[in-house]
């Protein structure tokens, strides 16, 4: 059995501190600690050779993405708090009014404050010459690989909040069902640049299905 | 061996379409084939309104519609059909199937021949009454049937299919420099030759007798559907049933309840058998040139083509009952198949002996020994995980049961045995193997699926670990292919050792990126690199 630090998604040996995760898409924030684990299969600047992305190929999302998530999370927490307040003040509960809704809002607000931080720290992507690697997920950690030879089309999407922060989403589709890869929280100009670059990739013969 | 059947007699008689499509016959009936616009078969003017009669009848019976209104609706529908018929034309150009329709808003649909994925023929009862056939043209990337000719005479339909498939191969062949047009022609040619001379092309791969259909109906998922239907009916008629029971006291009591249950169960099985027989009557799978062809159906007869080069994965499915009896089914994922009408077109064998099923999978893939591969089990931690989950689940059920029902609640603990059994069964179902150009993935307790996935068909990969998987150093690798929507979750290697999963992710991604993923020749078709 390979040592646990060789895994892409298991996190550290203890599996408790996600931010020291080692592996195929190591967390750049954890610095040198993860270098050993990633080194085994990584080929810096690889062009078609097997191996996960190397340390310097891995990029975090734009920090504004985290701010955006705080805002959206805060809005959700407010909604949840409002619903709880309605129940609280209208339904005959054996509690002093405000206790329940206060507690619910506190939990929601805590989640809205913490989850974006964890999520942002987990998010890493590597745009390499021939493929795109993405690692994401707070509880469910997913590492996905999209070879460019399989790309069918590439979108950028920008919601109203995205525009407010100057961000954009890049969404790549292969012939597989559903969306294959999504990069939220890219700088809007960067997203467009990437889209144009990916649009030029020639699909390979057997990408046709 | 091929049973003579009135329909569809494919391939068509030789000589009809020996040239390219552009010079196909001077016969006036072949107008559409030769490039000049042609109409549908006039019977369509009756077939279209007939299609609407079902709902109309229902409304009539329900009393929601007066006969006069129904009559007016029917007449207007017939009139509309006549107009639609007059304005509907189709033709095969040099490089496209062109369908034009519409009275005020003229709609013109051009389906380039090289985008055609398959051409299917189907005959519902109303088509058979008029000796016509419906032609469905599926194009690459289309979510729904792109081209639909609701009624052509049977010979016309067969000629059109042969022509479209052959011309598609010709167009695509001349586009692909590597193979050259002559090679493409060679591939296309046998489909125009009589089956008798091309035994290899019309090779019979599987055929199902009525006995197998009955077994399929007894053991298939349709039993559940039928049971649900009966349950629903019982709900609807619950009041009547109560009255009946009151009126006939003899029926009350244990014997009556047993009788009702027995009738319901037998009814579900009978319904399921009937549905299976109707859907898969005379099921015949043949290989014809670069395609598989499936013929089936009692009331609605269908003849579907599955181009081998569009096959994304082959899988053998065994549900729990079939596995105990030693039976299995074989299915394929074909890219671009829509979820609607093409829903169950990916079935290569509705039911066969387990060995037959794997042999068929191997024959379709044409890779030696792939069916006999020994699959490696997943780490024992995967089993422990399932055992813990089973025990925790039963405890979570038992504790509140004891709180509510006191000692009687302990009965919930009896669930431990089946839960543990399911946990072990679900672990044993897991298995994986790598063979030249293939990944084999097996999983599933209720339906055990063994999927044979060509590496060259991988679209993208995803390795996911849930928090509990991470605790045990496990992860699940999704082999994402262009599968048909809905039916299943796609091939997965569930609960791999996380390190091994990581390595496999890198290896497979590297293989796809570098193009080191040759398809087996059987699936490569003519555009193989």
Image: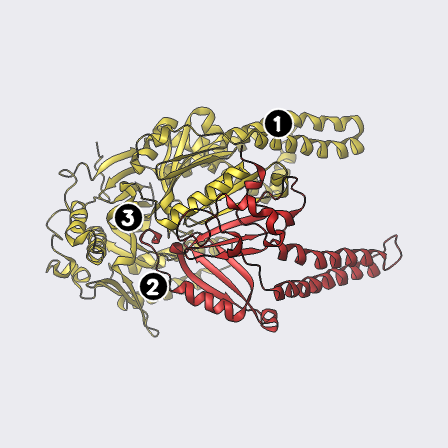
Chain colours: A red, B yellow
Q: Is residue B406 above or below residue B111?
A: above
Are labels 3 and 1 assigned to the same chain? yes
Q: Secondary structure at mark 3?
A: helix
In the rendered image, is residue A59 in sight?
A: yes
**Residue at mark 1:** B420
Residue found at x 25% / y 50%? B527
Could you tell which of marks 2 and 1 lies nearer the N-terminus? 2
Could you tell which of marks 3 and 1 lies nearer the N-terminus? 3
Residue found at x 37% / y 57%? B141
**Residue at mark 2:** B78
**Residue at mark 3:** B128
Label 1 packing within 10 angstroms: few (<14), some (14-19), many (20+):
some
Q: Position of residue B455 (x, y in %)?
A: 38, 43
Residue found at x 23% / y 52%? B165
Q: Position of residue B250 (x, y in %)?
A: 63, 27
Position of residue B256 in the picture relative to residue B14 (left or right): right
Chain ID, mark 3: B
- Cα separation, mark 3 vs mark 1, equals 53 Å
Name which quarter of the figure residue B432 lies in: top left
Q: Position of residue B177 (x, y in %)?
A: 20, 56
């Amino acid at each position: 059995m390979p040592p646990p630090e060789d895994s892409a998604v298991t996190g550290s040996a203890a599996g408790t501190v996600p931010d020291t995760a080692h592996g195929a898409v190591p967390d750049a924030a954890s610095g040198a600690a993860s270098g050993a684990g990633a080194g085994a299969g990584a080929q810096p600047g690889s062009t078609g050779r097997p191996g996960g992305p190397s340390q310097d190929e891995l990029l975090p999302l734009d920090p504004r993405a985290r701010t955006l998530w705080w805002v959206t999370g805060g809005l959700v927490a407010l909604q949840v708090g409002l619903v709880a307040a309605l129940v609280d003040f209208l339904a005959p509960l054996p509690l002093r009014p405000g206790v329940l809704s206060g507690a619910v809002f506190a939990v929601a607000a805590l989640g809205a404050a913490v989850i974006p931080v964890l999520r942002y720290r987990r998010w890493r992507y590597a745009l390499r010459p021939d493929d795109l690697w993405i690692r994401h997920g707070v509880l469910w950690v997913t590492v996905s690989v999209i070879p460019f030879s399989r790309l069918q089309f590439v979108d950028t999407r920008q919601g109203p909040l995205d525009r407010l922060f100057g961000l954009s989403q890049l969404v790549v589709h292969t012939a597989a069902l559903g969306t294959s890869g999504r990069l939220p929280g890219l700088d809007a100009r960067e997203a467009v640049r990437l889209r144009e670059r990916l649009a030029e990739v020639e699909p390979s013969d057997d990408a046709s299905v | 061996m091929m049973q003579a059947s009135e329909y569809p007699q494919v391939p068509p008689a030789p000589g009809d379409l020996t040239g390219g499509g552009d010079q196909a016959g001077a016969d006036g009936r072949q107008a559409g084939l030769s490039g000049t616009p042609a109409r549908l078969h006039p019977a369509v003017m009756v077939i279209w309104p007939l299609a609407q009669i079902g709902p109309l009848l229902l409304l009539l019976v329900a009393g929601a519609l007066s006969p006069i209104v129904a009559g007016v609706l029917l007449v207007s529908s017939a009139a509309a059909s006549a107009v639609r018929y007059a304005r509907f034309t189709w033709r095969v150009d040099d490089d496209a199937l062109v369908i034009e329709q519409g009275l005020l808003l003229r709609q013109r649909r051009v389906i380039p021949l090289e985008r055609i994925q398959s051409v299917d023929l189907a005959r519902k009862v109303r088509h058979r009454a008029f000796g016509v056939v419906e032609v469905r043209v599926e194009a690459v990337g289309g979510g729904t049937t792109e081209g639909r000719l609701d009624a052509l005479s049977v010979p016309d339909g067969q000629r059109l299919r042969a022509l479209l498939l052959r011309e598609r191969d010709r167009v695509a062949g001349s586009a692909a420099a590597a193979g050259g047009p002559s090679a493409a022609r060679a591939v296309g040619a046998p489909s125009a030759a009589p089956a008798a001379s091309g035994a290899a092309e019309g090779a019979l791969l599987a055929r199902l007798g009525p006995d197998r259909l009955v077994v399929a109906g007894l053991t298939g998922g349709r039993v559940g559907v039928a049971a649900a239907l009966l349950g629903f009916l019982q709900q609807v008629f619950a009041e009547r049933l109560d009255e009946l029971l009151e009126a006939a006291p003899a029926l009350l009591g244990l014997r009556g309840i047993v009788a009702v249950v027995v009738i319901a169960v037998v009814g579900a099985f009978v319904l399921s058998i009937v549905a299976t027989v109707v859907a898969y009557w005379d099921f015949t799978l043949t290989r014809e040139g670069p395609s598989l062809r499936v013929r089936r159906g009692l009331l609605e007869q269908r003849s579907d083509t599955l181009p081998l080069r569009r096959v994304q994965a082959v899988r053998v499915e065994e549900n729990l009952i079939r596995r105990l009896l030693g039976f299995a089914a074989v299915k394929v994922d074909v890219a671009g198949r829509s979820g609607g009408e093409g829903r169950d077109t990916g079935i290569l064998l509705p039911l066969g002996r387990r060995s037959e099923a794997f042999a068929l999978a191997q024959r379709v893939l044409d890779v030696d020994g792939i069916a006999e591969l020994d699959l490696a089990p997943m780490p024992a931690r995967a089993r422990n995980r399932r055992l813990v989950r089973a025990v925790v689940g039963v405890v979570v059920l038992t504790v509140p049961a004891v709180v509510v029902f006191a000692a009687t609640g302990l009965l919930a603990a009896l669930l431990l045995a089946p839960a543990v059994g399911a946990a072990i069964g679900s672990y044993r179902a897991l298995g994986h193997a790598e063979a030249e150009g293939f990944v084999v993935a097996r999983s599933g307790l209720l339906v055990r699926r063994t999927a044979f996935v060509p590496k060259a068909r991988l679209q993208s990969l995803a390795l996911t670990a849930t928090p509990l998987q991470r605790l045990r150093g496990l992860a699940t690798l999704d082999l994402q292919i262009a599968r048909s929507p809905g039916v299943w979750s796609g091939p997965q290697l569930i609960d791999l050792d996380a390190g091994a999963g990581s390595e496999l992710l890198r290896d497979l991604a590297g293989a796809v990126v570098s193009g080191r993923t040759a398809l087996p020749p059987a699936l490569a078709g003519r555009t193989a690199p």
